[in-house]
Amino acid sequence: SYVLTQPPSMSVAPGRTASITCGGNNIGSKSVQWYQQKPGQAPVLVVYDDRDRPSGIPERFSGSNSGNTATLTISRVEAGDEADYYCQVWDSSSDRVFGGGTKLTVL
Amino acid sequence: QVQLVESGGGLVKPGGSLRLSCAASGFTFSDYYINWIRQAPGKGLEWLSYISGDGTAIYYADSVKGRFTISRDNTKNSLYLRMNSLRAEDTAVYYCAREGRYSSSPHFDNWGQGTLVTVSS
């Protein structure tokens, strides 16, 4: 089965940049999605196909993917960005797969 | 606007059964793959199953294969999940999620608010 590895937690000061990683074997050959989930709410898609943003998602959210690591970058972090973030891919053996999630704390 | 509303969750004993529903509105339901995804308390997201727009393509995660059955009724704009032989580890919030189209890879562009299933004696 295909495994996606995310750091369990990270913290960032307001106004700084947060980079959340998602590791997987040759993940650069796959398309990566990112979801934001705030407490008590359903997840929201923030990036798809590595770097595309759905309508309504701020430009501060961007994605990249190469080699064995995909990254979600949040620029000029705000208090409202505090949430859990999940990466997701499609794999031929495991089908739709999620990473374990990263809890982002805004200091 | 796109709306997905789950229902049918509740408390069930180990070994019991439950059927979840997901009512869709705001889009042409039959044009889209729909998925079930769950989240155990304090844990991450786990994909469970998908069904194609016409219901001919279905796939399950190994963790629920043989116990859960996904189905849909396009005349009612509804998705279902029949869950049998429930275990304590099936306790979770269950979400239905629409798959986006025109993408190189499956992704979930709209989610319901979830329904809680608790398996306990």
Image (cartoon, coloured by chain):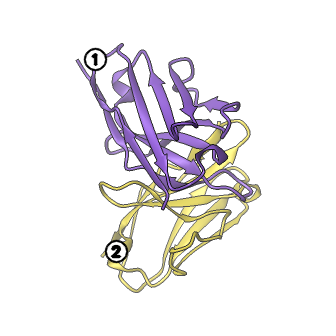
Chain colours: A yellow, B purple
Q: Which picture quadrant has residue B58?
A: top right
**Residue B76 point in image, percent of width and height:** 51, 37
Q: Residue at x 65, y 32 (%)?
A: B55
Q: Chain of mark 2?
A: A
**Distance Cα–Cα, label 2 vs label 1:** 39 Å
Residue designated by label 2: A80
Going 48% across and 51% down the picture, which residue do you hit?
B25
Q: Secondary structure at mark 2?
A: helix
- Neighbour tally class for label 2: few under 14, some 14-19, many 20 plus, Cα within 10 Å: few
| Coordinates of residue A91 in the picture (x, y in percent) | 70, 43
On residue A37, which mark appears?
Answer: none
Q: Residue at x 73, y 53 (%)?
A: A26
Q: Is residue B100 left or right of residue B44?
A: right
Q: Nearer the viewer, residue A61 or A64?
A: A61
Q: Is residue A18 above or below residue B112?
A: below
Q: Which residue is mark 1?
A: B13
Q: Amino acid at mark 2?
A: Gly
Q: Which corner quadrant of the image does residue B18 belong to?
A: top left
Task: Write down the chain letter for disc 1.
Answer: B
Look at the picture and state if A44 lies above or below B112: below
